[in-house]
Structure formats: C-alpha cells, structure tokens
Amino acid sequence: QTNKRNLTIYPQQVLSNTIMIKRELDHLEDGYKKMQRYYREQDFYSLPEVYKNETTLGLWHTFGSRYGSSTRRTNNITPLLTDSYSSDIFDYQHLFSTGSGPMYYSMHEEPQTHLYYSFKASYFHFSAMADPSLILVGKKYEWAQPDFTREGALANPVSLLEMGFDVGHFSMDLYLVDIWQVGLLSGSQLIVETVGVPRLGMTYNNHLNKFQVSIGQGEAIINEAFGTNKAEKLKGSLLRVNYTSTHFKQVEWTYSFITRSIDYESTNINYSSSSYTHAGYGTYIYKNRYRLGGFLSLESYSQNLNSVDYDDNFIKAGGFVSLSF
C-alpha cells in the first residue's frame, strides 16, 4: 500500500554525481534565460524567423528590360546567390545576396545586378544595396546613346541605405539614401546625372501576408542659375506598393504597383515623365529545394520633351530557376 505522506526527494537521490547535478542546473538556468529573452524580444518580430538558415543559387533571364540592363550592363544569366542566417528565433538574423534578380525596394520591377545586405536585431533593422557593375565596368556604367530607342529618359538605382524600427507586425522604413542614375537624350545631346530620392515607408508582415508601401521624392540642383541661364535641376519621385501572399505552402506570389516621375529643367531642355507599372511575381517550390518562377509586368509610360508628347506601353517578362542547399 502506498504511503500517503509527502516525501522529500533530494537531487543526490536522482543524480549521484555532483558534476551532473551542476550541469543539469546550468542547463535549466540557460533554458529559463532563453525563455525570458523569447518573451521579451517577441514583441519586435513579426515572425519568429524573418530570415531562415538557407542558401540558394539561381539564374534569371529577362525579356524587354528598359532599366535593369543596358548595352554595357547585363541582367541575364548572372548567377544570383542568396544566403540567409538566423542565430535563433527572436534573435539576430541577416540576409546577403549578390547577382541579378528583382529588388522589391527598387524604383523599377526588373531584375538588376546588385549586392544587398540586410539584418534584423531586436527592434531595429538595416539594409544596404549597391550595384557592383559600377566598379566592374567603370565609366562604361553610365547610360549611352545605344541604350535609347528614341528621345527621353532612362534610369536605374545605383545604391540604397535603409533602416527602420519594428514593433509587432509593423515596421517603419526610412530610406535615407536612394541614388538614381538618370540618362536623358534630347536630339544629339545626352545628359547623365544622379539624383537622391529619400523615402518613408511602412511594412505589415505575418505568416500569410506581407504588405509594403514607400513614398518619396528628391531634387538635385546640377547648376545654379547664372545670368540668362536657368538653373539646371533634376527631380525624381516614387511610390511603390508590394503585396506578398504565402497562403499556399508551395506557391508564393507578389504584386507590385510602381508610379514614378522624372523631371529635368535647364535653359534648353524641359522634360517631364510619368510611369505606372503593374508587376506580378510567382514562385513554385518543389520539395523545399527547387524553385521555379518568373515575373510579368506592364509599364504605361508618358513624357513631354520640349512640348512634344509621347506615350507608350511596355510589356516585360522573365523566368528563373534556383536550387536551395
């Protein structure tokens, strides 16, 4: 018959070795501290792991590019290597990518060669992008006359710095630096300049949906007004909205809407343009290792150059394959 008296059990009765007792107590203490950190930090993470431990290698091929490539910059069949790391749930995590692929924070929807790094730690996140082609091709990086099919402007992002703060499912995104390279062809005159377009954005993210919006504008005064010469100015503005769905385990898709304007003013040239782009991206995941997908976009473009109007629509598409390991 079982004795109903309360019995006191000492650690020595279960673990006779004092070293084993100390090791077990340390293990319990570490687990307790980790649980405390989980409880404290989870308020700053939309997901336990924003970036997972994964490395992927893929290739993109694009048709109809206007901004992501030029006659001396390519965005096709350039391997895209992406490496993401998570030290633990609700802890430091980062992502690094290099190669040619879409940039969902960019002024355009096309794949472009880039070097990108992003990290998240507690309530803070930071990201930076640069186009390595700027170093690889040097002076040939600039827009050239063979890139143009008619008079007008072409532009691409050169570098970007973004930081922000996260609480729950929401993030505030501050695009402190977003440098565009703009090439403008008017007659036989080609002007290539840069303009910074800082932005303010907001992100909402959960395990099924991600919504991003950012908006901003910037101006570069290239030459001050002098005598009868007007000031030479270059302006840019951007609104980009992204929606990503992960409702299906093996299928991910993203819709992007981009509206952008570029204006240039000088003594001899007056130029203004607006662009509205709808883009869709899709990815099919097979056995959590293989990915197959692509994008399709429609850009509605209009410009006025020295009182001459021009409007057109551009369809662009691309596909990719990648392997995770």
Image: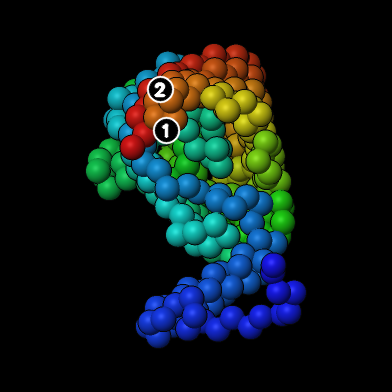
Residue 101 is labelled as 1
Identified at 68% across, 36% down, the residue is 209
Residue 281, horizontal then vertical, whole percent: 55, 24
Residue 30, horizontal then vertical, whole percent: 51, 74
Q: Is residue 67 left or right of residue 234?
A: left
Gap between marks 2 and 1 measured at Cα: 9 Å
Q: Is residue 126 left or right of residue 211?
A: left
Q: Nearer the viewer, residue 308 or 76?
A: 76
What secondary structure is marked by label 1? strand
- Name the residue type under label 1: Gly
The reply to whether dot 2 and dot 1 touch (C-beta < 8 Å) is: yes
Identified at 56% across, 49% down, the residue is 50
Task: Give the image quarter of residue 148.
Answer: top left
Q: In this orientation, does residue 11 appear?
A: yes
Tell me if residue 121 comes above or below residue 317 in the rendering. below
Which quadrant is home to the C terminus?
Answer: top left
Residue 320 is labelled as 2
Q: Nearer the viewer, residue 305 or 133?
A: 133
Q: In this orientation, does residue 228 appear?
A: no
- Name the residue type under label 2: Phe
Which quadrant is home to the N terminus?
Answer: bottom right
What secondary structure is marked by label 2? strand
